[in-house]
Image (cartoon, rainbow, N blue to C red):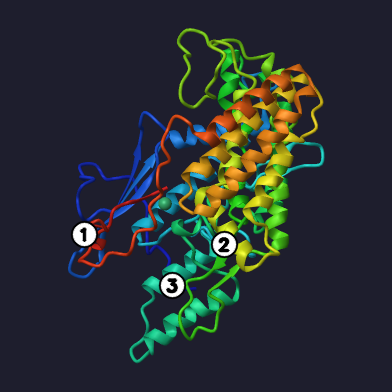
Amino acid sequence: MKPPVSANAFKVDVLPEGADPMDIRYNMINWVHRSTRGWSTGGAVSDPRTGEIIKGNVILGSLRDRQDYLIFEGLLSPYTIGNERPEILYQTALARIRQLAAHEVGHTLGLGHNYYDSTKGWISVMDYPHPLEKLQDDGSIDLSEAYQARIGDWDKVAIDYGYRQFPAGTDEPAALAKILNDAWAVDLRYMTNQDTDAHPRVDQWSNGVNQADELNRIMKTRRSALARLGEHTIRTGAPMATIEEPLVPIFMYHRYTVESASSMVAGLDYIYGMRGDGRTPVKWETATNQRKALDALANTLKPSELAVPKQVLDAIPPRPPGFGRHRELFPRTTGDGFDPLSPATIASDVTIGFVLELDRSARMVAQHALDPSLPGLEEVIDRLTKAVFDAPVASPYEAEIRRAEERVLVDRVMWLATGASASQVRAIASWKLGKLGARLRSEAAKGEADSAQNALLAADIKRFLERPAEPIKPQLPLDAPPGAPIGDNGMDWLARPPMGQ
Ligand SMILES: [Zn+2]
């Protein structure tokens, strides 16, 4: 039987002795050791006359694998004796780097990122993949299918569209359109970097289709991994203080799904529609889904979710000499001792900061004006205020976490009240701060620690709203689009800068 014509179209070999990696005849995958876990890249040298890609050049950073390995250690806490070499960690790290290599090769072939959340599930190596871990009934985590060992259905569409040679006489525009229309019919679409902010179904580092459901799912996985975290997360002989290294990615395990769920709030479900294609160019995320996302996001603010488990707090001493603090650890306010509160501050700011982004807040105002059934900015600030200030707590530690979150929320609403370019966003944020300040002043009797907190927050809000020391900065109206010729601040398409993952 003859092999299909595509077999061996590409071969990967070790660079022959004496060959120069800069040689234009060789497409290169460079395995590079760097000082940090930097982005890998896939770039190309193109013929400036035709755009034809002549040489592909990939740089794969080796330290990415160490970070992935660390995350898997944090998810599984796999070291019973402490000197095991769990095969699943090795295999999952390999599966991840295999995907990354295919991703960068995809760039060298001209493919862009595809972050679309298809109902078909995973569709492209050009996505930024989050491990698809599965929480088992017994609380353990299954990584056996964390990464796909193949290219995705969208990748086949993109290569088919970009590279297919049609027989002479083919109506090529019609044949190309058919490739995309067939893909569309099975929910294979292309949405990329610029679509991640406002589109509820375009997300980096996230699985799932409905990101509110996915956030609820991933919070359970995170909780299960956190409950195991401790000495079984590190090898025998490693300093106990280095439990903080896997703690960071596991405590923040939901951060990208928070970003994705936030994009459902005031979300714009759109396509780059063309006249005559018969498709809906844009519709707003439904009220049901927006409120579902707000509920899932509010869940991430429960003080019980932002507590560092006691067995972790008990296990982390100050860092020994030679293992000093570095930027991959939580910042702290407590000097040498691990800070039990700063992780909560940071994680709650991820949630509150993404929900109350300046342009998202302006979209809430606009959507609510045109469709009052959708949540407006007032409702969203109220929802966050309830999630934070009215959160039930089960211990003095959780009460302190709640106070840390309260400060984050007040600061973020102040940020809205000054930073938003939409006047009504600033007006609503200021109004809500005024209400909150009045409430805090009247709640002086909650208990001593809360009274201190409430007094300071109320005083800060009052000072902020009155701004006695600084003149009011006028906000300029929006810029008009340029009239004169436009300056050279765009990208020269011929330069083909490498695209990073
Ligand atoms: Zn990339």
Callout 2 touching callout 3 (CB < 8 Å): no
Residues 402 and 163: in front is: 402
In the picture, measured across the screen, residue 380 lies left or right of residue 48, that is: right
Expressed as whole percent of the image width and height from the top left, the position of residue 181 reads 52, 79
Residue 313 x/y as whole percent: 67, 17
> Crowding near pointer 1: few (<14 within 10 Å), some, many (20+)?
few
**Mark 2 crowd level (few <14, some 14–19, many ≥20, 10 Å Cα):** some
Which numbered disc, 3 or 1, marks the residue closer to the eye? Answer: 1
Label 2 secondary element: helix
Q: Which residue does the image show at 64% across and 43% down from the upper left?
A: 432
The correct choice, above or below, for 90 with respect to 119 in the image is above
The label number, if any, that marks residue 5 in the structure image: none
Residue at x 71%, y 64% (from the top left corner): 373
In this figure, which residue is indicated by the disc labeled 3?
Answer: 160
CB of mark 2 near ligand 1 (< 8 Å): no
Position of residue 318 measured from the top left corner of the image (x, y, whole percent)? 56, 10
Q: Earlier in the sequence, mark 3 or mark 1?
A: 3
Disc sitting over residue 487 in the figure: 1
Label 3 packing within 10 angstroms: few (<14), some (14-19), many (20+): some
The residue tagged 2 is 366
Q: On the picture, is 91 further left or further right than 487?
A: right
Residue at disc 3, secondary structure:
helix
Residues at marks 3 and 1 touching, judged by CB atoms closer than 8 Å: no
**Residue 235 is at least partly visible in this image:** yes
Question: Against 304, is 111 above or below?
Answer: below
Estimate the spatial distance between the alpha carbons at disc 2 and disc 1, rounded to whole Å. 32 Å
* Dot 3 beta carbon under 8 Å from ligand 1: no
Q: Nearer the viewer, residue 22 or 155?
A: 155
Helix, strand or loop for disc 1 = loop
In the rendered structure, which amino acid carries the disc numbered 2?
Answer: Ala
